[in-house]
Image (cartoon, rainbow, N blue to C red):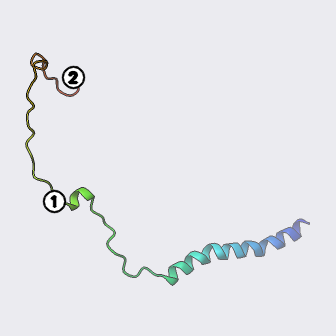
Amino acid sequence: MSVEFLWINIPLMAVFFALWVGVPMRMIFKRPDRAPRETRTVPAYLQQPAPAAVPAQRQALTSQDAGRELVGAGRS
């Protein structure tokens, strides 16, 4: 029983291996990529010219903010 099972599976393994190798090879040979386009890409923020730097405008302090001390990032 096991010998017959082995002899049945050997041709099936050969067919599956041929398909496993043959289908990708057919895809490569049918449509070869002879001259690939440039694959290096530039990030979007580098493709556009940089906008002109606009100086930050200082906001007017209100009466509530006048007595408060400004604290830098990371300080409490």
State the separation of the CA atoms marked 1 and 2.
36 Å
* Quarter of the image where the C terminus is located: top left
Return the mark for residue 49.
Answer: 1
Q: Residue at 56% across / 81% down in the picture?
A: 26
The image quadrant of residue 59 is: top left
The image quadrant of residue 37 is: bottom left
Vertical placement of residue 50 versus 71, above or below: below
Return the mark for residue 29.
Answer: none
Vertical placement of residue 38 versus 74, above or below: below
40 vs 13, nearest the viewer? 40
Q: Residue 28 at what x, y percent from top left?
A: 51, 79
Structural crowding at the residue carrying mark 1, measured as other residues with C-alpha within 10 Å and reported as few (<14), some (14–19) or many (≥20):
few
Vertical placement of residue 8 versus 71, above or below: below
Lower sequence index among marks 1 and 2: 1
The image quadrant of residue 2 is: bottom right
Vertical placement of residue 10 versus 75, above or below: below
Q: Residue 18 at what x, y percent from top left?
A: 66, 77
Structural crowding at the residue carrying mark 2, measured as other residues with C-alpha within 10 Å and reported as few (<14), some (14–19) or many (≥20):
few
Q: Amino acid at mark 2?
A: Arg
Return the mark for residue 75.
Answer: 2
- Identify the secondary structure beneath mark 1: loop
Which dot, 1 or 2, sits closer to the camera? 1
Q: Residue at 27% across / 58% down in the picture?
A: 43
Q: Residue furthest top?
A: 67
- Identify the secondary structure beneath mark 2: loop
Q: On the picture, is 65 further left or further right than 5? A: left
Q: Residue furthest right?
A: 1
Q: On the picture, is 3 further left or further right than 59? A: right
Q: Residue at 8% across / 37% down in the picture?
A: 57
* Quarter of the image where the N terminus is located: bottom right
Q: Amino acid at mark 1?
A: Pro
